[in-house]
Amino acid sequence: MTYFLPQTDTVLSAARGLALANPGLLEVNTSPLYLRARTSNPDRTVALVSGGGSGHEPLHTGLLGPGGLDAVCPGEIFASPHNRQIYEAGAAAAKSNGVLLIIKNYTGDVINFQIAAERLRHDGIPVATVLVDDDLATDKADTATGRRGTAATVVLEKLLGAFADQGAKLEELAVLGADVVASSRSLAVAARAQTSPSTAAPAFDLSPGTLDYGVGIHGERGTRTIDHRPVEELVAQMTDDLLQALPAGEEKVLAVVNGLGATTSLELHAIGSILHDLLTARGIQPLAVVPGTFTAALDMAGFSLTLTRMKPEWADLWTAPTGTPLTLPARTLAPDTAASVVAEPAATHVGVREAPTSRGVLDRYSAIVSQAHDNLTALDQLVGDGDFGDNLAGGVRRAVQRNESGTDGVTALAEAFLNDVGGTSGPLFGLLFQEMATVPWSDGQAPDALSVADAAKSGLAAIHRVGGAEVGDCTLVDALAPAADALTTAARDGADSPFTVAAEAAVEGALSTASLTPRRGRASYVGERAVGVPDPGSLGVALLFTALAAVYEPATATRLPDPERLTSR
């Protein structure tokens, strides 16, 4: 169990620890956080940049260095890195032929990496992307999200690292990456959920004698629960499912037996032996069977199998030498390399600060989010990875700090969520706040309701452009769209309490998501098992409009549900 995580700066502390354990190999940039290899093959002309939520180690940081990645952007636990991390890491690591971004297929990762790619291209840096989507459990036609990216990322990053060292160009690396991903499928099973850092309890419960089949690496529930069975039967079932789904191609396969955090080396090696025999019995030649913990889910008790059909020319790439933490022997910490952490100076503000405005909206939203935090965490654990409450509360907390330094309250929300908060909620809520910050705000007088409605619609359009979500997909859009429409109508009709009307529409829209089967976001991975649980992001939007009503229409806002009751299941 995860008993020993630091209470603050967990990810930064872990990054520093990795740098200290591998002196001379990598450096840590703290603001924004990313890790960068200090050396690379002189023939390499394209930088490889990857990253994702923390808690999956040794993915991706274990593959940082010669023969592997040039930079890694770690997000908070189970949360995507921020676009600013990726952008600055890409700019720092870029080589003469550009940057290849390696993205696991999760909504937050895709959004943040794509925003970073746009920023790098704007700077004149050639950029290509590879999307990893190997998870068989989420190969469903009724979702727009697509398959998740899981342990095949390890295979991909190793092969791309070797190919980049041969001087491969950006387009060649992108083609190889897409080919490797298309040739790979993974499937995971768990006997116990990971420990939630927020609650110190298992993120979900399993009945005795059962397994969750098709779990995700962020603790997402499996696609179904099955009876516990002998491991030989379980591995046979997983192998058959993978082979049936794996595209036709080469008969040689690379097999990765990946532990999810609490599965012992003894178990993984035994599973590898069983898998080897099953493949050969089916006429398939394992090029290699590789057991180990490569893509963890904190301390989940489970494992995944990854099969990759290997083209003949890939074999040498797989066995090419590397000098990364995952493969390097232990080192003695040398005094002259202890300073592996590069800290950026804190930003300074020069000039006269304007008096902060819209502090009332920020304070009320902060109080409401704090009141609902535990419930939002519990709801997100049922349909995702349990980080939404922390992300939302953390973003609001950072906005309060910015406001105290002189930034307008709504502008502070925009800056905090766009620049400081990872995961999906950060950039999406940030886009909404960015548009709403264009409205003239005042604590003493309500803003023009139609202007707020127009800003909300602009935020909705931006969210759709980046993530593609529409009403009915079971996302924050299901609360934001009806709230914007209701506010527009109320403002045009001259209603006495337009913000309360909008908040009521947002609440109704958020609660309606409980009857929807999610089509986007992490909840889509658990499919129908999410039915009955309102989308946490949509509740976050409902709480925002509740705050607006409470500040500017306190008399009518009393008819809105209490935030804690609203977010309770």
Image: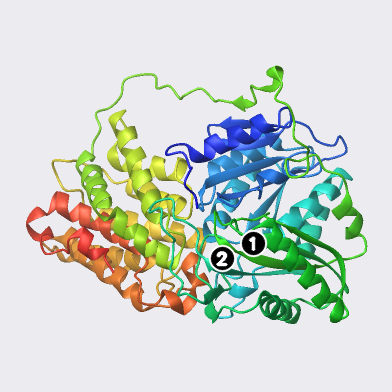
Q: Amino acid at mark 1?
A: Thr
Q: Can residue 476 be seen by looking at this rendering?
A: no
CB of mark 2 within 8 Å of CB of mark 1? yes
Q: Which residue is mark 1?
A: 150
Q: Position of residue 118 (x, y in %)?
A: 60, 48
Q: Quadrant of residue 257?
A: bottom right
Q: Amino acid at mark 2?
A: Gly
Q: Nearer the viewer, residue 358 or 71?
A: 71
Which residue sits at x=36%, y=58%?
A: 377
Q: Can residue 320 be seen by looking at this rendering?
A: yes
Q: Is residue 524 left or right of residue 564?
A: right
Which residue sits at x=44%, y=45%?
A: 421
| SS at circle 2 | loop
Residue 216, disc: 2
- Quadrant in the picture for the C terminus: bottom left
Dot 1, how many residues are within 10 Å of its Cα: few (below 14), some (14-19), or many (20+)? many
Residue 189, disc: none
Task: Report how far apart the C-alphas of labels 2 and 1 lie in the structure.
Answer: 8 Å
Dot 2, how many residues are within 10 Å of its Cα: few (below 14), some (14-19), or many (20+)? many
Q: How many marks?
A: 2
Considering only vertical position in the picture, is 213 above or below 16? below
Q: Quadrant of residue 135?
A: bottom right
Q: Position of residue 499 (x, y in %)?
A: 19, 58
